[in-house]
Image (cartoon, rainbow, N blue to C red):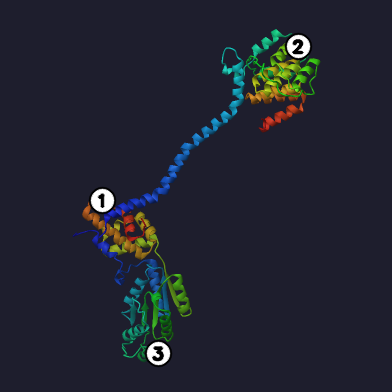
Amino acid sequence: MENSLFSKPRDLFLDVVNPRDYVQIDSVSHMYQSLKNSVQKPLKMILLYGKPGTGKSMLLHKLHHDLSKQQKVLMFDIPIVDEDDFLRVLAQRIFGHSPREIMTLIRFLEIAEAVAYPEVPIVLLDEAQLYSASLMEKIRLISDARAIKFVITLHKTDKEDIIAKEHFQTRIWESIELQNATAEELKVYVQKKLLKANCFDVANMFNDKNMKLITSLTKGNYRDTNKLLFSLFTLYYWYEENNPAAIKYNALKSKWIEMAAIHTGLIHA
Amino acid sequence: MLDVRSLERRWIKYKIKAYFPYIAGVFLIIIMLISLPIIWLDAEKVSEIKKAPSLSIHTANQTSTLADSNKEESTVLEPSMEFVKTFETAVPEPAIPSTPPAVSKSIPQSVPVTKVLSVPDSSTIKPPPKAPTPSTIVTPSDKQVILNHNNESKIDIESVERRFKETSNPNLGLFIARYYYDHGNYADAYNFALKTNGINNKIDESWIIFSKSLMKLGKVEQAKKTLQLYIGESNSDSARALLDSIERGTFK
């Protein structure tokens, strides 16, 4: 359907991590600034942790986007679980070496020492809980040797707490915890995102009651909110095509929000 | 693409599920509100039925003895002037003390007297096994009655009443009052106790039966007032005990 009011907002809430979609919210901005300050310090390892969907990956991508203009930064958003492959990729993309022989930790440290950048390169590891304990031990040794500065993200679960305890507890110099948004923060997030894309009419449809319902359904989780709003605008798009008289443009329909929540699995019906 | 129709159906199911506890709660409250008065009324009916036997026996006696009519309303206490008249015409003036105490004067004013009920046909009824009170003066004829009573022989209550009318012996009156009280005929018990008190107002048991009959006939305040007046006159322990039991609600 051409000139649909809801197709653009729908696409805005697709669950993809793009630093350009980063929305500045007070609390998140504060976290991001802390993260940036920590990266500037001579620290060897920085831990970013929180529940899934709290914006860890987005912050990591934003950091990568901002720092890559100034220094050598490498982002691993999909973990490389094989140790040899991991070290080989690091050696190639950070230090420009692609040795034919098997890449051992000692060989990697030799290459790092030989290159010696004026500023320690930064490697950003997303979903670090997927790395094996043995690889994490090697990462720790590389950071101890000050060859690379690591910023890693972890899901906050009991299991991952154990990983953090075993490998990072004594070596983490900075740890930042991300939390779910409040209703107010979520409203700012949604409206800023819509206004940034010039979806003014749709942004005006969100009232406090709608936001309370959305927050109660998603518990302030950004990923769940994105999924819910994507389904919601898909529904609006459908009604716009099939039953436009049912749409009220002054507020979102609670019924349709709940239907979207049923569709995304936030409500078990 | 979303299957909107299916989503709408699922949403309706979800809303029904979500509101079910509230709907069920409201429904339960409504049922309780409706059923509570019914249960309460039933409980009242049951209590009335429980109370009814004493009255029904009483009225049954009356109906069986009343020759012509079924005057059920006779259970209501009214001044038994007819009874007094018939009694007075039949018997000579009893030896009432020259200065009757204040109690005997005040009682008839405050306590309504029951309508005269004809004496039940008691040819087949046995008098209750009851020992005479030690306070009463026993005459030879009384001794005979009590002896008969103790021997559980048949007593023609009618003949006792006839003798009472003839002699105005307060012990006979007390006997008849006690007999009727024991048989649940509280209106007649009241009448004979009243008459006995009129003849001799110092018989404890007669006043006790008089007050107990009033209680059984539902005249609680009058019973209390009578006892208070009598206690004031006689300082009777048994009357005081009865008054206490009435006030505590333990009177049966």
Horizontal side of residue B70 vs A226, given as left or right: right
Could you say which quadrant of the image residue A227 lies in? Answer: bottom left
Horizontal side of residue B15 vs B161, given as left or right: left
The N terminus of chain A: image quadrant = bottom left
Q: CA distance from mark 3 to mark 1?
A: 68 Å
Residue type marked 3 = Ile
How many numbered marks have been drawn onto this rendered protein structure? 3
Q: Nearer the viewer, mark 1 or mark 2?
A: 2
Vertical relation: B21 (above or below) A53: above
Q: CA distance from mark 1 to mark 2?
A: 104 Å
Q: CA distance from mark 3 to mark 2?
A: 139 Å
Estimate how packed mark 1 is, as few (under 14), some (14 to 19) or many (20 or more) residues with alpha carbons within 10 Å: few
SS of the residue at dot 1? helix
SS of the residue at dot 2? helix
Vertical relation: A161 (above or below) B42: below
Image marks 3 and 2: residues in contact by CB distance under 8 Å: no
| Marks 3/1 same chain | yes
Q: What is the chain identity of the residue bearing mark 3?
A: A
The one nearer the camera, B8 or A8, is: B8
Mark 1 highlights which residue?
A: A246
Residue type marked 2 = Thr
Could you say which quadrant of the image residue B157 lies in? Answer: top right
Image marks 1 and 2: residues in contact by CB distance under 8 Å: no
Horizontal side of residue B131 vs A202, given as left or right: right
Residue B167, numbered circle: 2
Residue type marked 1 = Ala
Q: Is residue A42 visible?
A: no
Q: Is residue B172 visible?
A: yes
Q: Nearer the viewer, mark 3 or mark 1?
A: 3
| Marks 1/2 same chain | no
Instruction: Say which residue appears at 32% left-offset and 53% top-offset.
Output: B10
Could you say which quadrant of the image residue B89 lies in? Answer: top right
